[in-house]
Image (spheres, helix red, strand yellow):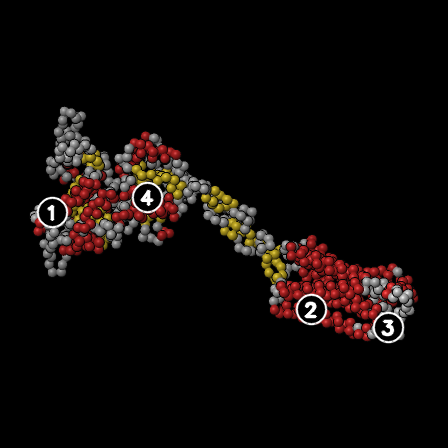
């Protein structure tokens, strides 16, 4: 025996209990032809099995079907009735050993009654196989041990609906759900998945067909006030019928509806949509199915009319719109004969659009039959009197794996669910007010996740018969170059579009964040792409590079010209009197100083980075060493004129050369150590400018760089001090005043160089360094050599031996007077005087030389 639980009536009459007498039985109203169709599908499967010679041979299946009137309380009473075997004695000793009345139950249609029945029957292990209860909660085997179903769980449907909504770009939607286990659990899963996909719910309201008019009006007001244009309706077909009626009263058209499988392919709802509220609706439906012979069997209603009881009489009268017995108080209708024919009758009973659900009932009955067949199967002979335990039947049903006559595979997973597979259908209205349910895609959970949703290349009809996909977003999509910033106090789908900052881009619409460009790239003006940064260095092609190169070459040429002049007039007294050997070496070093500035211009490379600093350090030390040597010669020569002094012997030409070599060699050693330990190298500076790459020479070892610079500064200060001490010596015989002034310029330039170098950005720091080299080189050249060139070229009469001897005597006299006066002052008490000793000019066979 198989049990069947259906609600042939959708409601019942409400009666007030007086509590003075026993309550009257429940009076059911609102006949539901859909449930009669379900019962017919169950009867068809049973009869087909009974007529089969392969499945359960020699064993017949019976059925016991009950009407619940849509009441959960009535459903529980029916479940208890099916659990009890009225033919067995109910004595105390037999209560725990008697067999159950039915071996399995087909039903219920809705989720909430199914949860109640499954909870009640679970301890008895009686299989309950539902054809349309989709609540994901029923997959919990710890609570519903004996529940199975031939329709997929809403867990998959809810996720599929969320992915479908996301596919069309709807991120701002409203939701209406049935206020029961089916709607609440289904919408909870949809909401969770929607949040993961970036979809926001503007509202989610519960609805039940028995809600008061005030509650319904509140839902209508919420929909009217909303800005979303897409409504996800997770409603049972009965609730959808009631809600559709209310929506029609307020003419709420223009919304895109997304529906669950319970109503989306219901032709009766489409027929009742007179105001075209649901035009263009899209949703999930159970895949189409075909059961050969079912339609003919279902329309053979005479087999239902086996008794004259009130139940089937009511069904017959409603089906053919007639009355068997007319009463005076009722409106006169056509009289029923009991032989009416369904040919030409069009109502919900003759509509075969629910064939997928009929197929679920068909598979449920066959599942029980195959389980029983496995139990009764044996090798030698079958014992048809075997005692059927509900747990044994349940275990066998959970194991079955078979194909229907149409080739469809049937099996249950560990949760008692089948694999989830849905068709995506679109409501497409026709000119004759008929709605076509057009299949536009598939959703199959057995495929990889990225291929589960598959929309076919078909024409969609959307709300208001539009062929354009409606837009339902809280905020417009953020264009390229911007990113979303959430609006305060609103859901995550409501945002403002903010332009990416410099150095960041967004190359996709609706970017959550901007992406920072790589270090060698920068964002373009539109902030939608990274462009390679421009390399910046002091080049020969730009104006600054050209000016500095010109100044360097001019200084080189000027130094060469001075050298030529000195070489041409090398035998004149003035050139000879100024230590011509050191002068030529100084001019050579100044030429190198001017030329080394050129190594700072151009793209940095390994050799140029090492050469520029080493050349700068060594040439400047050579230059200052020569100046220091010239200054020491003047001082030593002056000291050598004093009585008993032997200074010039200690600082002759050989000693001068060795001093220049020694000073320079120290700098060479410093540079070698610097290049060996951590030499300068080319580097890219990304920090100085945001949109440029500064190509520069990194110092390598900062200690090495500052040691080279510090050593130059030390020699410069020493040279300045020596020159300052010799500043008052005779003008025509030494260069102390010019050297003092030149070294003053040199020190000032390089002292000012340090802060300017540190604070100058990019290539300007290189320009500052070149400027310091050129400025100090020009200072030395102009202060030391130009006055002499002026006398040599413009005042040749002063460049004579006689003139220089006269000037020497005059200055020596002045010096002696100064010395004598000093002695008088010192010995002023005794009024004593001292003799004046005039300097003696030393001559040799070559003539006048090194006059102090």
Residue placed under numbered mark 1 in the picture: 85
Q: Secondary structure at mark 2?
A: helix
Q: Residues within 10 Å of mark 2 (few under 14, many from 20)?
A: many
Q: Earlier in the sequence, mark 3 or mark 4?
A: 4
Which one is in front, 730 or 664? Answer: 730
* Earlier residue among tags 1 and 3: 1
Of labels 4 and 1, earlier in sequence is 1
Distance CA(mark 1)–CA(mark 3): 150 Å
| Residue at the spot of label 4 | 187
User: Where is residue 254 shown, x and y percent of the image?
Assistant: 38, 35
Relative horizontal placement of residue 555, taking residue 229 as reference (left or right): right
- Decide if residue 263 is in sight here: no
Does 767 sit above or below residue 329? below
Q: Disc 3 and disc 2: Cα gap in Å?
A: 38 Å
Q: Which residue is mark 3?
A: 643
Q: Which residue is mark 2?
A: 667
Q: Nearer the viewer, mark 3 or mark 2?
A: 3
Relative depth, front residue between 140 and 851: 851
The quarter of the image holding the C terminus is bottom right
Q: Is residue 31 above or below residue 754?
A: above
Q: Which residue is located at x 73 percent, y 58 percent?
A: 748
Q: Nearer the viewer, residue 83 or 726?
A: 726
Residue at left 29%, top 46%? 154
| Residue 533 at x, y percent in the picture | 58, 54
């Amino acid at each position: 025996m198989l049990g069947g639980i259906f609600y042939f009536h959708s409601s019942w009459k409400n009666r007030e209990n007086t509590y003075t007498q026993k309550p009257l039985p429940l009076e059911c109203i609102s006949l539901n032809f859909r449930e009669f169709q379900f019962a017919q599908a169950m009867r068809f499967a049973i009869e087909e099995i009974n007529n089969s010679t392969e499945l359960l041979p020699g064993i017949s299946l019976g059925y016991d079907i009950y009407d619940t009137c849509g009441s959960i309380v009535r459903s529980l009473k029916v479940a208890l009735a099916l659990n009890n075997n009225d033919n067995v004695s109910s004595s105390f000793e037999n209560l725990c050993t008697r067999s159950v009345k039915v071996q399995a139950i087909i039903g219920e249609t809705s989720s909430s009654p199914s949860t109640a029945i499954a909870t009640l029957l679970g301890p008895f292990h009686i299989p309950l196989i539902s054809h349309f209860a989709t609540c994901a909660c029923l997959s919990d085997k710890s609570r519903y041990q004996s529940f199975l179903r031939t329709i997929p769980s809403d867990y998959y449907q809810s996720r599929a609906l969320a992915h479908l909504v996301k596919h069309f770009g709807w991120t701002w939607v409203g939701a209406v759900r049935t206020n029961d286990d089916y709607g609440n659990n289904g919408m909870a899963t949809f909401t969770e998945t929607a949040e993961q996909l970036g979809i926001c719910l503007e509202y989610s309201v519960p609805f039940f067909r028995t809600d008061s008019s005030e509650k319904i009006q509140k839902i209508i007001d919420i929909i009217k006030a909303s800005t979303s244009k897409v409504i996800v309706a997770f409603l049972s077909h009965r609730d959808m019928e009631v809600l559709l009626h209310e929506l029609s009263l307020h003419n709420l058209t223009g919304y895109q509806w997304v529906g669950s499988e319970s109503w989306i392919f219901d032709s009766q709802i489409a027929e009742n949509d007179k105001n075209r509220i649901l035009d263009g609706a899209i949703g999930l439906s159970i895949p189409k199915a075909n059961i050969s012979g079912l339609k003919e069997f279902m329309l053979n209603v005479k087999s239902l009319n086996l008794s004259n009881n009130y139940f089937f009489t009511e069904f017959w009268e409603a089906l053919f719109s007639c009355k068997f017995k007319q009463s005076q108080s009722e409106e006169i209708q056509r009289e029923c004969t009991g032989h009416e024919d369904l040919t030409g009758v069009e109502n919900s009973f003759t509509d075969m659009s629910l064939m997928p659900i009929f197929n679920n009932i068909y598979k449920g009955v066959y599942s029980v039959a195959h389980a029983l067949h496995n139990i009764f199967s044996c090798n030698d002979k079958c014992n048809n009197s075997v005692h059927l335990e509900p747990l044994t039947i349940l275990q066998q049903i959970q194991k079955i794996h078979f194909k229907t006559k149409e080739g469809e595979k049937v099996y249950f997973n560990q949760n008692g669910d089948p694999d989830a597979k849905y068709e995506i259908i679109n409501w497409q209205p026709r000119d004759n007010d008929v709605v076509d349910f057009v299949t536009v895609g598939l959703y199959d959970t057995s495929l990889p996740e990225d291929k589960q949703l598959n929309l076919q290349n078909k024409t969609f009809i959307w709300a208001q018969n539009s062929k354009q996909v409606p837009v339902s977003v809280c905020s417009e999509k953020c264009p390229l170059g911007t990113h979303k910033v959430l609006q305060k106090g609103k859901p995550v789908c409501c945002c403002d579009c903010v332009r990416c900052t410099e150095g960041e881009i967004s190359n996709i619409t609706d970017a959550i964040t901007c992406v920072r460009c790589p270090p060698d790239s920068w964002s373009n003006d539109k902030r939608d792409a990274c462009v390679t940064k421009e390399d910046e260095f002091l080049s020969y092609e730009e104006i600054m590079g050209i000016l500095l190169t010109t100044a360097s070459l001019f200084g080189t040429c000027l130094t060469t010209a001075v050298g030529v002049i000195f070489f041409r007039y090398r035998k004149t007294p003035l050139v000879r009197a100024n230590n011509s050997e050191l002068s030529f070496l100084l001019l050579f070093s100044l030429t190198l100083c001017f030329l080394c500035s050129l190594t700072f211009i151009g793209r940095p490379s390994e050799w140029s980075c090492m050469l520029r600093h080493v050349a700068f350090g060594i040439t400047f030390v050579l230059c200052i060493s020569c100046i220091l040597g010239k200054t020491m010669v003047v001082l030593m020569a002056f000291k050598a004129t004093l009585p008993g002094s032997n200074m010039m012997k200690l600082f002759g030409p050989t000693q001068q050369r060795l001093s220049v070599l020694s000073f320079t060699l120290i700098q060479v050693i410093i540079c070698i150590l610097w290049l060996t330990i951590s030499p300068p190298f080319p580097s890219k500076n990304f920090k100085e400018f945001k949109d440029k790459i500064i190509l520069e020479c990194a110092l390598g070892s900062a200690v090495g760089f500052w040691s080279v610079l510090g050593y130059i500064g030390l020699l410069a200060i020493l040279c300045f001090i020596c020159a300052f001490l010799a500043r008052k010596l005779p003008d025509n015989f030494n260069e102390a005043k010019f050297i003092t002034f030149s070294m003053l310029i040199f020190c000032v330039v390089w002292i000012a160089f340090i802060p300017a170098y540190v604070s100058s950005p990019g290539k300007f720091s290189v320009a500052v360094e070149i400027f310091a080299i050129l400025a100090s080189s020009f200072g030395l050249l102009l202060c030391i050599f130009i006055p002499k060139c002026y006398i040599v070229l413009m005042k040749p009469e002063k460049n004579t031996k006689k003139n220089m001897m006269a000037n020497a005597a005059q200055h020596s006299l002045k010096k002696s007077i100064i010395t004598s006066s000093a002695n008088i002052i010192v010995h002023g008490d005794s009024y004593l005087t001292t003799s004046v000793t005039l300097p003696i000019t030393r001559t040799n066979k070559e003539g006048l030389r090194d006059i102090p």
